[in-house]
């Protein structure tokens, strides 16, 4: 059983706050500046900055068209974040604390959008030829990086925890 580490809990909380701030500042800057009017900025042969609204989950996959959709999705994200916060109090590895913090921050960054706008603002559009990945934002990036860090931690540090 892992012992509570205030240092790791603070690190995870700091990562969550940084993720929320970076996500919200980037969205606010784009929505009040370059993307005030919906448009596409072609940046490179494989990347655009766009204005897209996601009313679904995870890269627009599961759409909920009901008025209660944003509230339901937000409640689920907050519940998951609370569960992750409990997990954060039990981690013994720096990588896990950072990963959990990034996932919490990304989830809550998107919750803020859902509650403010009824949808999540996405703006990063990567593509190859005519194939475009679903647009995403910094919150989604934080969630993805956080999950990768947790998988890495589980794969390479999980055996160490099992030996104690």
Image (cartoon, rainbow, N blue to C red):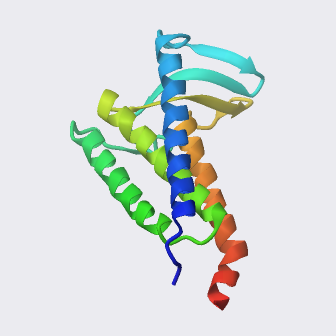
Q: Position of residue 40 (x, y in %)?
A: 59, 15
Instruction: Give the farthest residue toward the right.
Output: 45
**Which image quarter: residue 157?**
bottom right
- Residue drawn at x 69%, y 32% is 127
Instruction: Give the farthest residue toward the front.
Output: 6
Question: Is 54 located above or below residue 99 in the figure?
Answer: above
How many numbered circles are shown?
0
Asked whether the viewer can see residue 163, the reply is yes
Asked whether the viewer can see residue 136, the reply is no
**Which image quarter: residue 158?**
bottom right
Q: Position of residue 42 (x, y in %)?
A: 69, 16
Question: Is 75 located above or below residue 149 in the figure?
Answer: above
Q: Position of residue 49 (x, y in %)?
A: 62, 22
Q: Position of residue 16 (x, y in %)?
A: 51, 47
Front-lying residue, 124 or 102: 102
Instruction: Give the farthest residue toward the left.
Output: 67
Q: Quadrant of the C terminus?
A: bottom right
Give the side of residue 119 with respect to residue 152, left or right: left
- Residue drawn at x 65%, y 63% is 94
- Residue drawn at x 62%, y 29% is 125
**Which image quarter: residue 63?**
top left
Give the side of residue 90 with respect to residue 164, left or right: left
């Amino acid at each position: 059983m892992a012992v509570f580490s205030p240092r790791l809990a603070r690190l995870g909380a700091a990562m969550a706050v940084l993720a929320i701030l970076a996500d919200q500042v980037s969205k606010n800057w784009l929505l009040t500046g370059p993307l005030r009017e919906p448009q596409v900025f072609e940046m490179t042969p494989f990347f655009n900055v766009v204005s897209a609204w996601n009313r679904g989950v995870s890269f627009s996959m599961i759409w909920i068209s009901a008025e209660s959709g944003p509230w339901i999705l937000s409640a689920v994200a907050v519940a998951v974040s609370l569960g992750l916060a409990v997990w954060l109090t039990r981690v013994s590895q720096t990588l896990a604390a950072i990963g959990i913090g990034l996932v919490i921050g990304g989830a809550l960054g998107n919750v803020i959008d859902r509650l403010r706008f009824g949808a999540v603002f996405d703006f990063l559009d990567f593509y190859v030829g005519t194939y475009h990945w679903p647009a995403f934002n910094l919150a989604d990036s934080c969630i993805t990086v956080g999950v990768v860090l947790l998988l890495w931690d589980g794969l390479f540090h999980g055996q160490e925890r099992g030996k104690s």
